[in-house]
Image (spheres, rainbow, N blue to C red):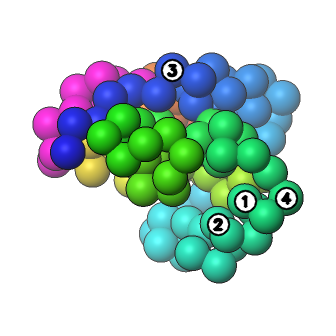
């Protein structure tokens, strides 16, 4: 699996943070990360491109029209979550995706600034 940074998602997250659509939550991303049924419900009403906006990583080997192509989620399809960015940053570091780790860290800094 070769995952690369999804620059479209980074730009989208920056816009959301700038617009104040954030949750400066402390907790476990597992509590906020949309489950499969929420993902499917989102995709019933939105295009795959919009789904892609919520994932910092892209696995082109899966095909851009497959949910499996999108990795490192950071929000709940409404807001950027602090714990989602932390989880993305940590997982990217563990898996050796330095560009995704760096992007998540930069977004985390922007979110924390905006939350003050």
Instruction: Look at mark 4 in the image and give the residue it sits on.
Output: 45
- Nearer to us: label 1 or label 3: 1
Q: How many marks?
A: 4
Q: Check residue 43 in the rendering and tell me which mark sits there, or answer none.
A: 1
Q: Quadrant of residue 19?
A: top right
Tell me residue 68's x, y (percent): 42, 56
Instruction: Look at mark 3 in the image and give the residue it sits on.
Output: 7
Whole-Å distance between the Cαs marked 2 and 1? Answer: 6 Å
**For numbered disc 1, what is the local secondary structure?**
helix
Circle 4: is it few (<14), some (14-19), or many (20+) Cα within 10 Å? few
CB within 8 Å, label 2 to label 1 = yes
Q: Is residue 95 magenta?
A: yes
The C terminus - image quarter? top right
Which of the pair 15/59 is nearer the observer?
A: 59
Whole-Å distance between the Cαs marked 3 and 4? Answer: 23 Å
CB within 8 Å, label 1 to label 4 = yes
Marked residue nearer the N-terminal end (3 or 4): 3
Whole-Å distance between the Cαs marked 2 and 3? Answer: 21 Å
CB within 8 Å, label 2 to label 3 = no
For the point 75% across and 32% down, the residue is: 16
Instruction: Look at mark 2 in the image and give the residue it sits on.
Output: 39
Tell me if residue 85 comes above or below residue 27 in the rendering. Answer: above
**For numbered disc 4, what is the local secondary structure?**
helix
Which of the pair 18/10 is nearer the observer?
A: 10
- Nearer to us: label 2 or label 4: 4
**For numbered disc 2, what is the local secondary structure?**
helix
Which contiguous range is marked in magenta?
A: 94-103
Tell me residue 115's x, y (percent): 70, 37
Circle 2: is it few (<14), some (14-19), or many (20+) Cα within 10 Å? some
Q: Is residue 70 magenta?
A: no
- Nearer to us: label 2 or label 1: 1
């Amino acid at each position: 699996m070769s995952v690369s940074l999804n620059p479209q998602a980074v730009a989208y997250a920056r816009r959301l943070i700038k617009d104040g659509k954030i949750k400066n939550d402390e907790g476990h991303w597992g509590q906020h990360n949309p489950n499969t049924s929420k993902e499917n419900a989102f995709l019933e009403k939105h295009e795959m491109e919009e789904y892609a906006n919520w994932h910092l990583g892209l696995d082109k080997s899966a095909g851009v029209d497959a949910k499996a192509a999108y990795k490192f989620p950071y929000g709940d399809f409404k807001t950027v979550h602090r714990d989602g960015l932390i989880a993305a940053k940590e997982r990217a570091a563990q898996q050796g995706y330095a560009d995704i780790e760096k992007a998540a860290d930069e977004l985390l800094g922007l979110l924390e600034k905006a939350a003050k």
